[in-house]
Amino acid sequence: MQGQASQIIESLAAEHRVLVLGGMAVIAHGLSRTTDDADIWLEPMHSISAWCDVVRDALGDFQEVYFFDVSQHRKISPAGLPHTIDTAGMVRVGGLDRYLDIFYQPNQLDVEDFDTAWNFATLGLGKARVMDESFLMATKTDTARPSDQDDVSFLEKKLRKEISSRLATCTPSEATLLFSRYLDHATCEAALTNPEPAVRELGLSGLRELAAGGNPFAIEALKKRGEPL
Amino acid sequence: MLKRHTPSLESVWAEWEREKRAAKRLAARGPRPERPRTPDNSEPWLKYPPQSISDLFYISDKVAEVVAQCRARLHKL
């Protein structure tokens, strides 16, 4: 049976672009974990007030629903929604089968990042999309939650594996795109096995960048190859 | 703007130390005969990739259920 939070997400996604983030997105990327809430990023509108109207309209049929300002730890009235969005960048919707957190501006991202995040999302859930790993990791950076560190560790491993296998055979333009999403010593070393000299050069320059930051794997890889640090 | 992620230096150093310890352990153990590798015996929560928000909630609920069952059965030896 479809829950109330799912219904709201799907009804929002029928009319607007909706990205799933948070724990649900990490589950969609393959990690078996639990989550008590649903986090979504609803596309920006021409004003905060228009955005809030869309949110309020989507909740219209649900009687027990209420808004909660997580930063202030208090319930807010529907009229107070624009102020909360302006100051906290998100609102929690309570009174459903699960909490639904609707973001106007997720952690570490700008409102203007929505289009790029949308275009980079390759997993679909009905009409909603799941935020891609690199954007998802950005939202989980510099938070105090231990579960975010576990999520980042899982997403790093996943991206490393996927990107490394593509870097071994891809074209230079694809390699540039891949490195613009994720960079670590293993992906750089995978690029060094590519037959295209331009991709290998990208791998080397990535290793130099990491070595300059003190990455021990990158320093060792460059030394082994007799490359200057 | 595209968000490029690079693992934190702290996690890279932790990985570096793990790998060095594992290499030392393997070197100390010496060569061993080939053994069969355990096949992938994991079973997905769903028989198909998640296709809806409800599928994700289903996985989360099943994980929570299994964790609760395991915890209930745990006892001190």
Image (cartoon, coloured by chain):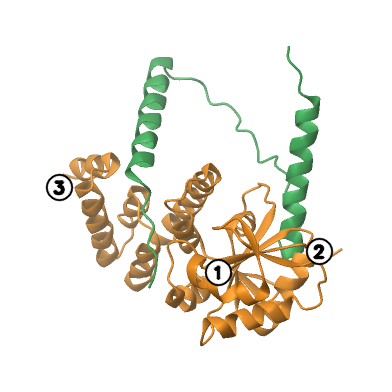
Q: In percent of the image, x 70 and y 52: which residue is there?
A: A36
Q: Position of residue A124 (x, y in %)?
A: 64, 71
Which circle marks residue A3 in the picture? 2
Q: Is residue A30 left or right of residue A126?
A: left
Nearer mark to the viewer, of 2 and 3: 2
Distance (Cα) linking label 2 and label 1: 26 Å
Chain A drawn in what color?
orange
Distance (Cα) linking label 2 and label 3: 55 Å
Q: Residue furthest bottom?
A: A46
Q: Looking at the image, can residue A76 be seen?
A: yes
Q: Which residue is mark 1?
A: A84
Q: Which residue is mark 3?
A: A229
Q: Secondary structure at mark 3?
A: loop
Chain B drawn in what color?
green
Q: Secondary structure at mark 2?
A: loop
Q: Position of residue A136 (x, y in %)?
A: 50, 60
Q: Marks 3 and 1: CB-CB under 8 Å? A: no
Label 2 amino acid? Gly
Nearer-N-terminus badge (2/1): 2
Q: Are there few (<14), some (14-19), or many (20+) residues within 10 Å of tag 3? A: some
Q: Is the C terminus of chain B in the top left, top right, bottom left or bottom right quadrant? A: top right
Distance (Cα) linking label 3 and label 1: 49 Å
